Amino acid sequence: MDVLARYEPLVDDYGAFRAACERPLPTVVRVNTIEADVGRATDALDEEGVGWEPRAWHPGLLELGTDSPGNTWPYFLGWLHGQEEVSAIPPVVLDPAPGDRVWDACAAPGSKTTQLAAMMDDRGFLVATDDTLGRLAPLRSNAERLGVTNLAVTHADARNFSLAAFEFDTFDAALVDAPCSGEGTIRKNPAALDGWSESFLAGVAGVQKGILRRAVQATRPGGTVVYSTCTFAPEENEAVLDFVLDAEGCRIVDFEVPLESTPGVTEWQGETFDPSVERARRFWPHHNDTGGFFCAKLEVAG
Amino acid sequence: MTENVGTRFDRLPATPDEREVEGRPTRESVVAWWDDRFGIPPETFDEYTFWERGAGKVWAFRGDAPSPIEVQGLGLFVLRTDGEHWKPTTNAVQRFGATATRNVVVLDEEAAATFVRGGDQAVDWDGDWGYLIVARELAGDVAPLGVGLFIRGELRSQVPKGRRIDR
């Protein structure tokens, strides 16, 4: 089944989209500013002769001239973390401050968790949750390798997450980087679409709605919730936003990320969504030479 | 990984007077140990609480939380106090070791490569035996790589298998 063909009506240049999906991804790392600043990390790469090129929109994201960044000295030291470029978008949109209380509801394997920690200057209170025990080990080992110390890791289904263990009852912000069909990861994993079905979409969309709803509930009035997926399916993106706009007190707000993107879609296969889903952004593989991605920023009602 | 030792974290008492569990290290003793052993200034840990999960495994959390707390992780696993000699973790040394002033052995690149591969080697070190911070020069400063056990003229790499790289 040609899954990606269903998105032809949503894409500006369908041929370029399909061609980009066939190409492997560049090797991109993020500088872990908890352990080293960008200048020192790039000096270390220079010393061992590894080429690097910063991404224009984010100076801490480097495309490397090696396929094995994990074997470099700065990586061993926890100064670098392998992270796909679009995966760095949600923490930038969430934009936490040092001292904030932040919940990463679907955290494993921890790339965005550790980016949030670095943006918080490793201060405040960061809670990373995942519902799969086997995925907590990589989450924890990534957080530890990167020297994150402001983090509590919890094993829970985010849909009914409880804050009872903590001394506070709401977060300042939450990230829902939801489990999804992963269509946008096709460049990293050519088998990503092998198990695809419309019934899978329906099931995972139900989970996404439940998690996003809980994240809005767990965030203080005026706080921020960021919703993201690595998939193209409107069922998992705009339809989930449309649901939560009805179910909880929140609104979708504009955000700026200096990468090419298109607005969220308000119609899909006969369904229409709240017009404000246009404030979400779709990041297509052929626009910025990345994986596919979707991101929305919500503000919890006061 | 240390998956099977439970999920309960208990905050270390500030001083021996506040100790409720026999033999449990105290915050005071942990901070003093980093200073005594490595010269890492006590104020490094001003914003930290220390927690024990299982006997003798100490975690550093930047902030505070109710004690005990049932979570899968709380801050960074920094120190083992269950052996005869306290042993810092690789991750703790990389995170906090840059300000160390003693018991730091700085290796050249070739010896550092042996160390990060997990290899043991003879080194020219006339200081204390026991657990040392192993470092190398990188990008303009000394960079702490991890922990070595120096004993009888040999530096034994303590880099965990999952952290080793093939240089």
Image (cartoon, coloured by chain):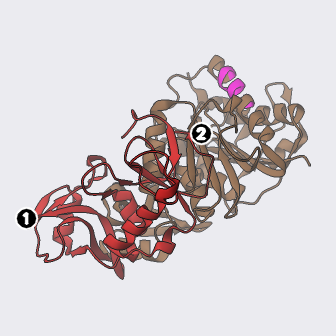
Which residues, given as a range, are shown in magenta?
A202-209
Which mark lies nearer to you, 2 or 1? 1
Secondary structure at badge 2 equals strand
Circle 1 packing at 10 Å, graded few (<14), some (14-19), many (20+), is few
Q: Nearer the viewer, residue A58 or A194?
A: A58
Q: Residue at x 21, y 72 (%)?
A: B109
User: What's under tag 1, amino acid-wise?
Assistant: Arg
User: Which image quadrant for residue A43?
Assistant: bottom left
Q: Where is residue B48 drawn, in percent x and y? A: 54, 62
For disc 2, the chain is A
Q: Residue at x 45, y 32 (%)?
A: A134
Q: Which mark is residue A120?
A: none
Residue identifier under label 2? A129
Q: Nearer the viewer, residue A207 or B9?
A: B9
Q: Where is residue B93 drawn, in percent x and y? A: 36, 64
Q: Where is residue A269 drawn, in percent x and y? A: 79, 25
Residue identifier under label 1? B152
For disc 1, the chain is B
Q: Is residue A65 visible?
A: no
Do marks 2 and 1 share a chain? Answer: no
User: What's under tag 2, amino acid-wise?
Assistant: Thr
- The Cα atoms of the two marked residues, 2 and 1, are separated by 45 Å
- Chain A visual colour: brown
- Chain B visual colour: red
Q: Residue at x 36, y 78 (%)?
A: B139
